[in-house]
Amino acid sequence: MTWRRITIILMAVSTLILSVYDAYVAFYTPERGDTISEVLGSWAVLLPPVAFIFGVLMGHWFWSRRRSLVEQPWGFTILVAFAGLGFAAYGVYYRDPVWWQPMLNLALGVTGGHFLWPMPFKDLKS
């Protein structure tokens, strides 16, 4: 068994376990705001880096490029600028969280993940 196969199995099992847990919590517990989606949604508003980090991961995983900007001499500066824009807004978000603020961080993160941390797809077989 290859490490790729182990990774695929681990991802599938983790997704199944989290899905079953989330469904159970959503339908069989009296509390509100306790599902994985609701917790992540509240974190995205109260802690802006959460949306930014998830955005970077989404840009890295699902929007790849052939060459990273980090390979360029000014690439690290762009990475710091993307991160700074996302994290600098924390004070604004903390005082008055509105719907577009987490989306801004997510968009900055996706863009940063795409341009600065691309993942080349050498083999698309599973």
Image: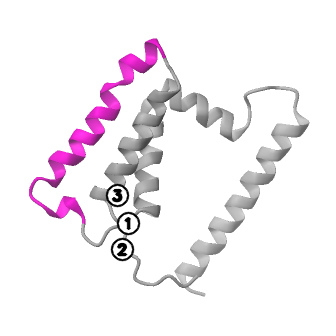
The first of marks 1 and 2 along the sequence is: 1
- Residue 3 appears left or right of 24: left
* CB atoms of marks 1 and 3 within 8 Å: yes
The x, y position of residue 29, in whole percent, is 87, 33
Count of marks, rendered view:
3
Under mark 2, the amino acid is: Pro
Disc 3 residue crowd, few under 14, some 14–19, many 20+, Cα 10 Å:
many
Residue carrying label 1: 64
* Residue in the picture at 85% in, 44% down: 24
The first of marks 3 and 2 along the sequence is: 3
Residue 20 or residue 121, whichever sits in front: 121
Q: Residue furthest top?
A: 95
Residue carrying label 3: 114
- Residue 117 appears left or right of 49: left
Q: Label 1 to label 2, Cα distance in Å?
A: 6 Å
The x, y position of residue 80, in whole percent, is 22, 42
Specify the label residue 120 is tagged with. 2
Under mark 1, the amino acid is: Ser
Q: Residue furthest front?
A: 100
Secondary structure found at label 1? loop
Under mark 3, the amino acid is: His
Which range is magenta? Answer: 68-96
The x, y position of residue 48, in whole percent, is 44, 30
Snapshot colouring: one colour
